[in-house]
Amino acid sequence: MPIVNRISALHDEVTAWRRDLHEHPELQFDVHRTAGIVAEKLRSFGCDEVVTGIGRTGVVGIIKGSNSSGKIGGSGKVIGLRADMDALPLTEMSGKPHASKTPGKMHACGHDGHTAMLLGAAKYLAETRNFDGAVAVIFQPAEEGEKGGQAMVDDGMMERFGIQEVYGMHNAPGLPVGAFALRPGPLLAAVDNFRVDVEGKGGHAAKPHLSVDTILVAAHIVTAVQSIVSRNVDPLENAVVSICAFNAGFANNVIPQTAELRGTVRTLSPEVRDFVEKRLKEVVEGTAALFGAKASLTYERIVPVTVNNEAHTPFAADAAAAVVGETSVNRDAIPVMGGEDFSYMLNARPGAFIFIGQGDTANVHHPAYDFNDEIIPIGMSYWAKLVETRLTA
């Protein structure tokens, strides 16, 4: 491309949008202010259609291109571009002038930047319309654990707007500014959460032989479940089992009756996902039984594996290379064990998810994180190039 003058000229304006969104973070589906701003701007850009309330609080804007004959809509092909809008329940510690004004809420994952970049691209595309077909710009709520992507798909978004392909983008701290990374096949992991409830026999700490110590049992479960990845999963496959919360007891001299563990499982294939869930139940119940206790597993599947379509991923990589050069695009990136509910959209339609370099900044989900505004025109240019390539006039 690389960066067209019009996109460069929009940089300051889009940065201002981003920082306003950053100052006013909203959680999960409760993104009413953000969605309202998005819808208002899409209408002001002259989008052919703007629909709110998709998947509860999602927004979709339709921009029709002009083909060589000047006919609006042209080929009838429609591609979707998606950005997420929700923040995280963290108190910001970035010290930036545009830091969150709401204690306990912050944009710690860069969704403010994703939304701003797609809005900027929408403004450019609505002005130029240098493509044949239509673009659906998708603004999704509740990416952080509440399945907003699934909600939009279940609401009939793909069918309603005739979306045939769908693409997503996420910033990546540690990846240099001006770089992109993706791969065909599994790119991000399936995310599952679990809770283990242990019941023993409470009693006096001075008479442990008269009790069944749930802390001891739970501690052995913590150790035992690590054998699932190290000794049960094929070393050439990928899996993570992490226990992240251990709650038991309330006094120095009381052996508690119950204990609770909470954790997460990450996998990159449906087969390994099924196996780890089955094996986790066996290990939890079997370990507890060894000590005369009982343990139950509650297992919740949050999002599936994010799988880039083998045929469509090269289109995304080519668009990125047209913006930043082939040497700055990693077409065979190492999969990430974090999750992304864009997976629901990729399960519904073929497409690809790509990482854009954020540079050397705090990592996502950290209270000192802030989106790097330097990458805004790069992300906007990627969206524009992808549209103009996939919907060639």
Image: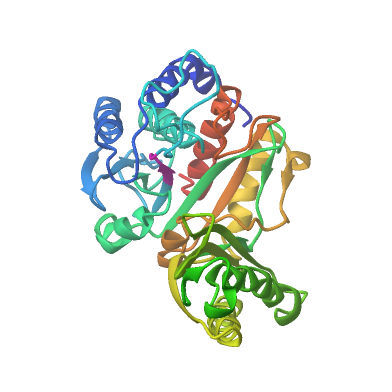
The segment highlighted magenta reads: 82-86
Q: Residue at x 30, y 58 (%)?
A: 151
Q: Is residue 149 magenta?
A: no
- Residue 280 against residue 308 in the figure, above or below: below
Where, by quadrant of the figure, is residue 106 drawn? top left
Q: Position of residue 37 (x, y in %)?
A: 28, 28
Q: What colour scheme governs how the chains and residues are painted in the rendered image of this protein?
A: rainbow
Question: In the drawing, does residue 188 fall left or right of residue 19?
Answer: right
Query: Can residue 194 be seen in the rendering of this structure?
Result: no
Q: Nearer the viewer, residue 354 or 368?
A: 368
Magenta span: helix, strand or loop, mainly?
strand
Q: Which image quadrant: the C terminus?
A: top left
In the depicted structure, whether residue 155 falls above or below residue 171: below
Q: Quadrant of residue 57?
A: top left
Depth check, front residue: 50 or 73:
50
Q: For this rendering, which residue is in front, 161 or 243?
A: 243
Q: Residue at x 53, y 81 (%)?
A: 281
| Number of numbered discs visible in the structure rendering | 0
Position of the N terminus by quadrant? top right
Residue 245, horizontal then vertical, whole percent: 53, 57
Residue 77 x/y as whole percent: 38, 55
Residue 327 rendering spot, x and y as whole percentages: 78, 41
Toward the viewer: 173 or 207? 207
Side of 93 where 132 appears, left or right: left
**Residue positioned 75% across, 74% down in the render:** 230
Q: Is residue 233 above or below residue 89?
A: below
Rendered view: 387 above or below 200: above
Indicate left or right for 64 with 378 as reference: left
